[in-house]
Image (cartoon, rainbow, N blue to C red):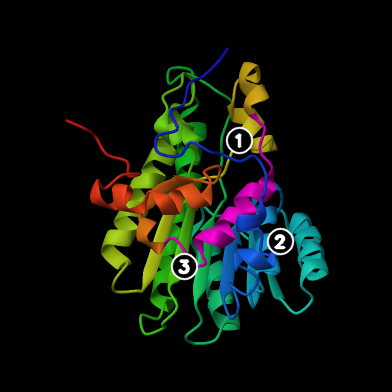
Amino acid sequence: MSIHIPTGLIAHTHHDIYPAIDACNPSSGLGDSAVDRTVVITGAGRGIGRSIALNYAKANAKIIVIAARTASQLDEVEIAIKAVNAACTVLKHPTDISNEESVKALIAAAAAASAPNAPYTLINNAAHAPPPTSILDSDPKTWKQVWDVNVFGTFLTAHYLLPHLSSTNPTPHYIINVSSIGSRLTRQGLSAYQSSKTAINRFTDFLQLEHGESHNLVTFAVHPGTVPTELGKECVPEELHHLFTDSPELMGGFSVWLGSGKVDWAKGRYLECKWDVDEILAVKEKVVSSDMWKTSVSI
């Protein structure tokens, strides 16, 4: 079975990290792009979240706060971060992203460890995706859990972080919400997951509109690639598993690039980590003038 996904303005795509988004490559200009920054990553225990953490360590983040439900996974990620950047402070925080008190404690811990005017980057990577099931056959609690994690959890982290974002800091704060290419699609059995990711795109737009100027905030919704993670394989039919051709390093490097200030003009928008960054920069005028890369209903 094949699936056609239009690429739009971007012709050249990638499957793995490449020099322009690799903080270890001097010509990328990303080597010190996260200096003095506190980076909070949910879903950081494995896969894409783990890669994001390691790439921010390469970019010399001052503090990296890693959150996941499983504490033992965070122990391994901390060791990996320290192997990349021994000077980086790592905070491990077991977190249920759908639980308000758990998220409040996560953000409070990040703020307590940070300087009063520290620049923040929050990457909402935690997600839940059950196996494909029709609406009729879905268990209501399972369906709701997808939205509790993917949407409500994203709201909670943003809601509790916003009071800590200093508007006087000359360096922008960033919130990167992990969306999905599924937010652009309608596939049988994925009503909970795909609709939740569409909601993430809209929430990102609202977050930018309401708090971009007042909190010196830049937001993005990002498709993290088709990575062969346990989560991805659970929610995608087996006949489409051949599409999982991307490395988690791709989203790791792309996240650092997004938080470097190079593409702040795309704030509030949906992007895909597979898109070539030079081509993204080249279409700035077209995207901004036509208000593209946003989720809306055309009538």
Q: Nearer the viewer, residue 103 or 288?
A: 288
For the point 75% across and 79% down, the residue is 87
Q: Alpha carbon of mark 3 to alpha carbon of mark 2: how far?
A: 19 Å
How many numbered marks are there? 3
Mark 2, other Cα within 10 Å: few <14 / some 14–19 / many ≥20: many
**Residue position marked by numbered label 2 in the rendering:** 54
Q: Tell me whether circle 1 and circle 3 mark residues in contact (CB < 8 Å).
A: no
**Residue position marked by numbered label 1 in the rendering:** 226
Residue type marked 3: Gly
For the point 61% across and 56% down, the residue is 20
Residue 189 drawn at (x, y percent): 49, 21
Q: Nearer the viewer, residue 292 or 242?
A: 292
- Whether residue 3 is visible here, answered yes or no, is yes
Q: Nearer the viewer, residue 164 or 81?
A: 81
Q: Quadrant of the C terminus?
A: top left
> Which tag, 2 or 1, sits closer to the chain's start?
2
